[in-house]
Amino acid sequence: MAEVRIDLVSKAFGTIQAVEDLSLTVADGEFVVLLGPTGAGKTTTLRLVAGLEKPDHGRISIGGRDVTGLPPAERDVAFVFQQYSLYPHLSVYENLAFPLRSPTRRVPEDQIKATVTRIATMLRIAHKLENRATRLSGGEMQRVAIGRALVRRPSIYLMDEPLSSLDAKLRGELRLELKRIQVELGVTILYVTHDQIEAMTMASRVGVMEEGRLVQVGTPREIYENPATVYVATRLGQPAINLVPPSVLPQVATPPGTATIGARTEHLDIRRADGGTGTGIVARIEHLGDQNHLHLDVAGHHLVTLTESDIALDVGDRVNLDVRGALFFGADGRRIAA
Amino acid sequence: MSGLTQAHSVVAPSTASRRISGAIVIVYAIITMLPLLWIFATGFKSQSDAIAYPPKVFADPSLQGYVNLFTTRSRQTPEYMASLPPPETWYDELVRKQNMVIVGPSKFGARFMNSLIIGFGSTFLAVFLGTLAAYAFSRFRIPLADDLMFFILSTRMMPPIAVAIPIYLMYRELGLSDTRLGMIILYTAVNVSLAVWLLKGFIDEIPREYEEAAMIDGYTRLQAFRKVVLPQAATGIAATAIFCLIFAWNEYAFAVLLTSGEAQTAPPFIPIIIGEGGMDWPAVAAGTTLFLIPIVVFTVLLRKHLLRGITFGAVRK
Ligand SMILES: Nc1ncnc2c1ncn2[C@@H]1O[C@H](COP(=O)(O)OP(=O)(O)OP(=O)(O)O)[C@@H](O)[C@H]1O
Ligand SMILES: [Mg+2]
């Protein structure tokens, strides 16, 4: 394990600037999650670290060693791909053993067997070792793909949405397992995801990417509570943060220059307004089971908030909104201190 | 295999449609195989049965065609025949019945060997070079890649006869006329374009993440190519090899023009096997039958690869 430094790295594909002046340091034993919408440059960033792409400029070092010019094989990283994870012509065992069989490593056969068995047991796929890689369920394939990385002890594990194709239940399970393994073994991981729950629950730190740039890095809590921009604020939170102009919530005391108020569920206190005096109207109630999404219509703007499932409100009811601790953003999208 | 079938048909075919398509396939197979069966049968007829009119479907089996194919013979006077010691072998005896003696082996063995060397040699080279070129076109950013691919294909657009004379003259200058090396180079050049195009299609289908994963795991590109790409391209390589071999094996126009002795292949040789007073049809048929064997064996050996199809089952989509 080792510290990984990405220093002002850029990469363009033709006219598309996939990654722009990106700097990020992943400390030894840290679990850093890159979060961002599709096309933000997350995969490209991982590929740059792995050496599968050459940066146009910038420097990448692993454990203090400049690896910018080195081929992937000499960088000592492991990669879990977004797609195409397993070799279809090999068995599960052979897939797991493949990284250990590489000519640069020359691991003795009995040691390969021990490692593969240990990892397979840990990922609960030991009973599938003799199967063809193609004869597995999606979740099993994903475990094997993660296992292929875990059989090695590289400086850093690069994981590109390793859980994205799984159903919610399995994703939840593997999320816990992966985090447990990371903590137990103390490994360094740079992890890409769309999924904010993964980001919130697994990350030591989250990096939010937008159009090739890293716009903010911080602990999940910092990113959630202190987003630097409107864009970052929208990346975390379920339901998404409500963004409205100050005129919609005149009761809120806004700092000068405020163009947008960002109000999350916990910033909103909703009370039924008697006598038809409230500023908002309940437009829709979505029952999620244990909780509700409450859709409000406030001065022509649409707000969504989370409420208890037993809330005594009906569609058409008028409500009053109290706002506490909301976030304020200027016209350029930057945060303004309250 | 079942996965492949399911992918193409939404519902399982009914018994009736199965039977009908089965019948069509059988009828078609009989029609296409009839000439082959006739050639096969003719190889075991005597010369008189072979040219009998109306044609004889069933004739007394005779190995005369095969003996004539492999030998040269000369006719002798009855007195001379009577003076000979008793024949030592069954084929000696067969020849003597026609008042002839075996003078020596024919050139068929040598011609057949030429066909084997030139056919398999050029197929190997075309597939080898084609695989490497196709991999490069598929994986690397090559300047003018599209134009180069078109150029490669364009070498196949001209009919052989249009380039035969320049090649003939060039080969004469280079001393490649009537040499096996010359024929191997020529057939490789013709086949490599087909090989590049076919194989590029197959290799494009193999996700590059497979090699990238291997390279990250400590393999060089060449090792990743061998361990990951080649096994998955096996189907395409087998299919390409069969196409290349069929072309090189059957090629006639260049062979007639560029080979006459040393390097002559079987196709120009077989049809000109002359017996006494005309074509020796049983010998021609025997030669054709033997000529078909290698390609049938090769195809059957590679059939497993052809049918297996490409498995992309481990793809998460
Ligand atoms: N090999 C390539 N050639 C050309 N453009 C590319 C290539 N790889 C990536 N890009 C472009 O670079 C940009 C960033 O791509 P990247 O794959 O890094 O996005 P991502 O954040 O991983 O997205 P996703 O969440 O969909 O996986 C995209 O606009 C993409 O089209
Ligand atoms: Mg991606």
Image (cartoon, coloured by chain):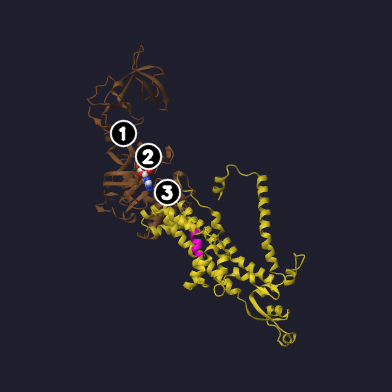
Residue A69: tell me if it is visible.
yes
Amino acid type, mark 1:
Tyr
In space, the residues marked 2 and 3 are separated at their CA atoms by 20 Å
Could you say which chain is coloured brown in the image? A
Residue A85's disc number = 3
Report the residue that reaches farthest toward the top: A275
Q: Is residue B231 above or below residue B107?
A: above
Residue A89: tell me if it is visible.
no
Q: Position of residue B204 (x, y in %)?
A: 45, 52
Q: Position of residue A112 (x, y in %)?
A: 39, 57
Amino acid type, mark 3:
Ser
| Residue labelled with disc 1 | A231
Residue A38's disc number = 2
Q: Is residue B262 above or below residue B188?
A: below
Q: Secondary structure at mark 3?
A: loop
In space, the residues marked 3 and 1 are separated at their CA atoms by 32 Å
The residue shown at (37%, 39%) is A38
Could you tell me what secondary structure mostly forms the magenta stretch?
A: helix
Foreground tag (2 vs 3)? 2
* Label 2, ligand 1: CB separation under 8 Å: yes
